[in-house]
Amino acid sequence: MRLTGAALLGLAVAFAAWAGGLPQFSLKDTAGRTHTSSEWAAQRAVVLFFAATDCPLANGYVPEMNRIQQAYRARGVAFYAVQGDATVAAAEVVRHAKEFGYTFPYLFDPQESLATYTGATTVPEVGVLSPRGELLYLGRIDNRQEDFGKQRPQATERDLREALDAVLSGKPVARPRTKTLGCAIVRKN
């Protein structure tokens, strides 16, 4: 049996997750810069925000994610948006990132390596990782979205901020997994 490049990458990412190792990647962002997992070593935590151009729930969270990034970047937290639909044309993603005003890198991940590594299945979903790639939190940003079509005026639980505060304090995240409401991550295969 012959494995394709995508299958080999998937196996490598799965092995790294199984072995507790840092995922190895080299991904371009919408500004054309290349980002690698080696950037994580200098951080206290890494946030991956899985997004999509056509998901209104994810798009509605961009301002909040920009605020959270502003509040935590000086504390050593790196933020990346990750395109959750690998079938969307690059030009559309670039246009989308500009239109919605992302203040942190928006990564193209055509092999869906970061979604596979974290187990993310939905946008908007966030993963918080250690500099070594350990998944510390996976789930919602907050509880503003109660159900499809039903939203609170303000969040009463701020899951991502609480997870980051715990990680930065050297404590375990109280709820390392929360249910995310949103659009499915679209897989190419």
Image (spheres, grey):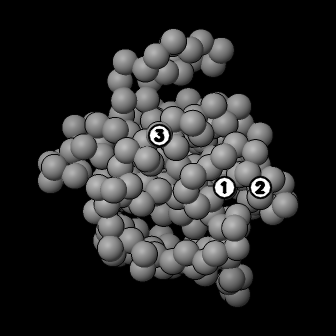
Dividing the image into 4 quarters, which one contains the C terminus? bottom right
Cα distance in 3D space between marks 2 and 1: 8 Å
Apparent side of residue 92 relative to residue 183 in the rendered image (left or right) = right
User: Picture quarter containing residue 188?
Assistant: bottom right
Which callout, 2 or 1, points to the residue nearer the camera? 2
Which callout, 2 or 3, points to the residue nearer the camera? 3
Residue at 21% in and 44% down = 166
Closer to the camera in the image, 126 or 80: 80
Find out whether the residues at labels 2 and 1 contact each other: C-beta distance under 8 Å. Answer: yes
The image shows residue 102 at horizontal and vertical percentages of 62, 49
Apparent side of residue 53 relative to residue 171 in the rendered image (left or right) = right
Find out whether the residues at labels 2 and 3 contact each other: C-beta distance under 8 Å. Answer: no
Q: Is residue 14 above or below residue 137?
A: below
Q: Secondary structure at mark 3?
A: helix
The image shows residue 49 at horizontal and vertical percentages of 53, 49
Q: Amino acid at mark 1?
A: Gln
Q: Amino acid at mark 2?
A: Val
Instruction: From the image, tell me which residue sits under label 2.
Output: 93
Instruction: From the image, tell me which residue sits under label 1.
Output: 83
Instruction: From the image, tell me which residue sits under label 3.
Output: 67
Residue at 56% in and 14% down = 151
Q: Amino acid at mark 3?
A: Arg
N-terminal of the pair, mark 2 or mark 1, is: 1
